[in-house]
Image: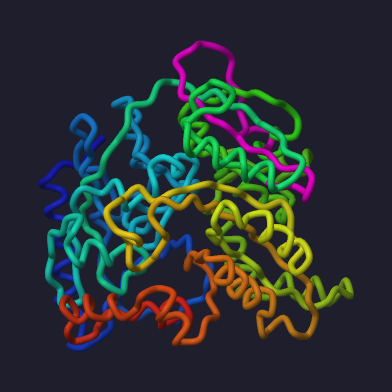
Amino acid sequence: MPVGWEEHAAGVARLERSYAALPPGAPVRLAKRTSNLFRGRAQPGPGLDVSGLAGVIEVDGDVAEVQGMCTYEDLVEVTLAHGRIPLVVPQLRTITLGGAVSGLGIESTSFRSGLPHESVLEMDVMTGSGEIVTTKPGDELFDAFPNSYGSLGYATRLRIELEPVPAYVALRHVRFDDASSLSEAVAGIMESGEWDGQRVDGLDGVAFTPDELYLTLARWTDEPGPTSDYTGQQVFYRSLQQRTTDRLTVHDYLWRWDTDWFWCSRAFGAQHPLVRRVWPRRLRRSDVYWKLVALDRRFGIGDRLDRRAGRPQGERVVQDVEVPVDRLPEFLDWFDHEVGMRPVWLCPLRVRREGADRPWPGYPLTAGTTYVNVGFWGVVNVGPDAPTSPRNRAIEAKVSDLGGHKSLYSEAFYDRDEFDRLYDVSNLTRVKALHDPDDRLTSLFDKVVQRR
């Protein structure tokens, strides 16, 4: 149930009291125990109390008022009761709406609806000065907020667009024998919104090998029929290779990747039939696996196992990058030779906003250009050079060469000048000075590169 405006006001008041309780000049950060980030951070000190900002305030037709720390899992539960969903629902349940807007999010509807911040109509932001600022598209603060990762403040309330959805999603898994053919198909769907005469409402895919790639075409439908369940013994990503059509409820479609964290649950044995039978269904979800990864990082379990098995030292390669659709074949070919990690996720997108060449300064994708997000998450055993992150640094350079951009939820290794150029830090710094004159919020570079 929605929390209502009175409870929202109480949550904001609690947040403001926690800000006032910080020592003068102390850094401003969130007192938040969970995260979907994949980069280490310095141990936090006292933080802002956002515990009262984790719900949906109200739903009114095709618009919802949502608190900044509301997870998409909780948001979708409320909006589905109204027959609606946000225009873009990121793949993992515990991503928060505020996090997806300030740190970017993406999913299969991004080919027609852009990124989550593009369906925000208005938001309230607590800035570094402790002020709650209401901002709308076209305001400097609003336009600089996407990809700012808390360096401009934290969203406390967001008014977002919703879209009606029926009960089911019909899927087609279309195989391609090379990346060039897949790229051509993506470009065609982006222009027509159709494939083989049928409407496409959701579009993503998986590249298993250089000659086995799939696009999954989703179509919203009310047509009755049996549905698949990938929260049990079956694993969703494997179904792409096993069947050409499928049907899911809208709820299960939205979280199809969360149950096994795409394919990453196999690292914990959760896809082995015997392990899966005893692994509780309620614990087959991304936030559980994330906690296991955090334990591994804390105690170096994977590194110890590699040494015991005689494997070279591993470099963690966890990235999402956007490359122009016509450069996708070149990137995947380079990636196979230089990194060698498969499968990879493919998610086409185009920014929804028009009127400027690069309408979002902090993540300057070019308007009118189709990009494909390539997601890859794992460890590459590179040997003694692993601590210098050679594969990650090479990926950053290649993506820039191809006219693409890299998401910042994971490690970044750019030098200061390159980072400032790629993410228009001069604009970010100017806006930050207006709303955080005492510089109490950690800068974007310090957050994502220096891990502060």
Residue 139 placement, left or right of 428: left
In the image shown, does 388 or 430 lie closer to the viewer? Answer: 430
Q: Is residue 275 visible?
A: no
Please provide percent x and percent y for residue 320. 55, 60
Magenta stretch: includes residue 312: no
> Which image quarter is the N terminus in?
top left
Q: For the magenta stretch, what is the residue range?
A: 207-235
Counting labels gives 0
Residue 72 placement, left or right of 125: right
> Which image quarter is the C terminus in?
bottom left
Please provide percent x and percent y for residue 46. 30, 78
Q: Quadrant of residue 299?
A: bottom right
Magenta stretch: includes residue 215: yes
In the image shown, does 327 or 395 lie closer to the viewer? Answer: 327
Q: Residue at x 74, y 54 (%)?
A: 342
Residue 267 placement, left or right of 160: right
Please provide percent x and percent y for residue 35. 45, 62
